[in-house]
Image (cartoon, rainbow, N blue to C red):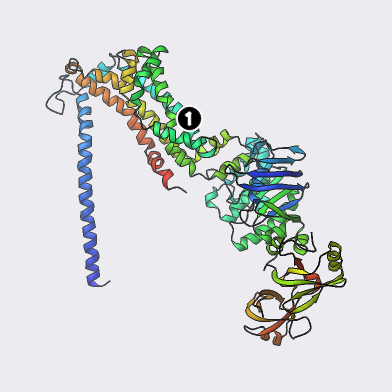
Amino acid sequence: MSETSMKRHMGLRASRTLANTLIYILLIAISIIWLIPFFCIVLQSFRVESTWQVGYVAPKVWGLDNYQKLFATDFPRWYMNTFIISVFTALLQTVIVLCMSYTLSRFRFKMRKPLMRFMLILGMFPGMLTMIILYRVLKDLGLTQANAVPGLILVYVASSGMGYYVSKGFFDTIPKSLDEAARVDGATRFQVLRKIILPLSKPIVIYTVLTAFMGPWGDYVFARYISFGASAGMNVAVGLYNWLTPDQINNNYTLFCAGGVLVAIPVTLLFLFLQKYYVEGVTGGAVKG
Amino acid sequence: MASVKLTDVKKIYDNKVTAVHDFNLEIKDKEFVVFVGPSGCGKSTTLRMIAGLEDISEGTLEIDGEVVNDLQPKDRNIAMVFQNYALYPHMTVYDNIAFSLRLKKMPEDEIYERVTNAAQILGITEYLTRKPRALSGGQRQRVAIGRAMVRNAKVFLMDEPLSNLDAKLRNQMRAEIILLRQKLDTTFIYVTHDQTEAMTLGDRIVIMKDGFIEQVGTPQEVFDTPVNLFVAGFIGSPQMNFLKANLVKEGSGYTVDVLGVKLPLNEDQIAVLTQKGVGSQEIILGVRPEHTSVLFDNQEGAIECTIDVNEMMGSELHLHLSSQNDDKIIVRLPTVDLTKEQRASLAYGNKMYITFPAKVMHLFDPATERSLIDG
């Protein structure tokens, strides 16, 4: 390498290092801004000396009082409600979405395309539009207020077939001849889905489960509306928010923070374990094959 | 082991395109039948209808005397090998081969026996624990064949199984399929676009074009007596030479007038033409490259040509010739009997003479494209 080209090479390298450094500084700054609220909430949840909002971050007296107090409230009930709703929704929604996607990917039937277009358009309307009529229907079925848990599961699961896009896209990339080979080998359509397609679609299955779990876990609007003030039917989001109303906030602010931390834990764990698949799941269908 | 009978089978797609027209064929038990034709001729569609992967629009399909039109593929007791192998990527070779047996809930020790046995026949024993992606194309195709083998299915369907392999491997696998066929001794239906595969593998060949059957026969029959121009051109490599000619009726005999020479026909040909009452008419004369006689000097009945290209194939020469009317003719000439002088004379631009013996001439009607003698 000549001296000039060597110099240029070094120059390029230096400028690349500089660019990378700047990018990292920016990213770190953004992460800090992002993480500060979480960090504050965690710290507040350990504050024992007062229960209202204060002008400082680090607690003066540390303790687990807030967490202990949580168990004397309706919080365990809300937590359980949320958990049940999320688990059932995740299971049912996953089954429905995967079956729907497989059907739309592999079967050819009349009205298939119009149906897909119809669902696409329908999905553009916000779900809130249906709220009033949904409440009437659920009330007639006796699934509101204290019985909101099954009602909410029904609401979350009912329209889940419309979320077929991502997994159908993924299934479309799996060669059809695999289905055909399996069918000739003696498999039913369901066995093809279970033994061939799903094992090949692990990332997308996990993605579907995760999104189906996350939706109800953090939902506020529907949960609030359908539980309609009955504490026994609330989920964590609704229950915790009640502690932030002007007459409650001074007594319950640190309690709210402790609840928030507990709500975040399962989701964080889930993501940590499944993160690898999650990323693959979102991008996998796009480039494979 | 079973017979397969297709009666007036049709495939009409939703967009009203007819892919297969009135397909009639009876395949005997243990017969090896090859569907051959250019792409889009309906051969794969027909095979997929037999497999149950495509609906049959009209007509009936019987396997072993039972109408199976509405049976699911899994209930037809057929095995199939796909062009792209269609191995299950998440399973090992062993699991791939065992898949159908497990679906049947066969005991594991019997599965083990069948899988290892098949693997031994196909020479893939050492790969049983590998996943398909760790195999070469040829090995994958063996696994695909193994998967079909272990099932002891009534009918063995193969959809262009060798098309994805390179030429050398294809020849090797072709020989192995012949061996396999002898071992399995079952009914085979094989789809290919390669006439060499069709000729070497089939007991009978079904030549298709545009959804129609053009001719059904043994390899020898379709080679010797093609019933129309398409079959004549499709079977044989290099393909048959076609020349404009005139059939001339003179008294009770016939001669062929081609490129300025008069060539006689033999008694059998004359008998057929007389019986059909064919008069003098324009014809298309077909002669295979290997049936063309090469003369090194001008004799009676010799056609003068110029050599355009001389391809040395080792055991034979492929000579590309132009007639004086600029008709292109290809000649296959075995090299073994040629003298040094003769070889030297077969150079670019040189003149040479050819002629066509009566028994190798195929006469086709230009209007109907059908053979005037065969079929």
Dividing the picture into quadrants, the one containing residue A78 is top left
Dividing the picture into quadrants, the one containing residue A233 is top left
Residue A207 percent location from the top left of the image:
41, 36
A102 displayed left or right of A246:
right
Viewer can see residue A80: no
Please name the residue shown 67% across and 83% down the image.
B346
Residue B275 percent location from the top left of the image:
86, 63
The count of marks equals 1
**Relative to A253, residue B145 above or below:** below
Residue A171 percent location from the top left of the image:
48, 40
Q: Which residue is mark 1?
A: A95
Dividing the picture into quadrants, the one containing residue A185 is top right
Query: Mark 1 Cα within 10 Å, few/some/many (few <14, many 20+)?
Result: some
**Relative to B56, residue A147 above or below:** above
Please name the residue shown 23% across and 52% down the image.
A20
B150 displayed left or right of B218:
left
Give the camera-side residue of A100 and B183.
A100
Q: Quadrant of the N terminus of chain B?
A: top right
In the rendered structure, the residue with mark 1 lies on which chain?
A
Residue B159 percent location from the top left of the image:
64, 50
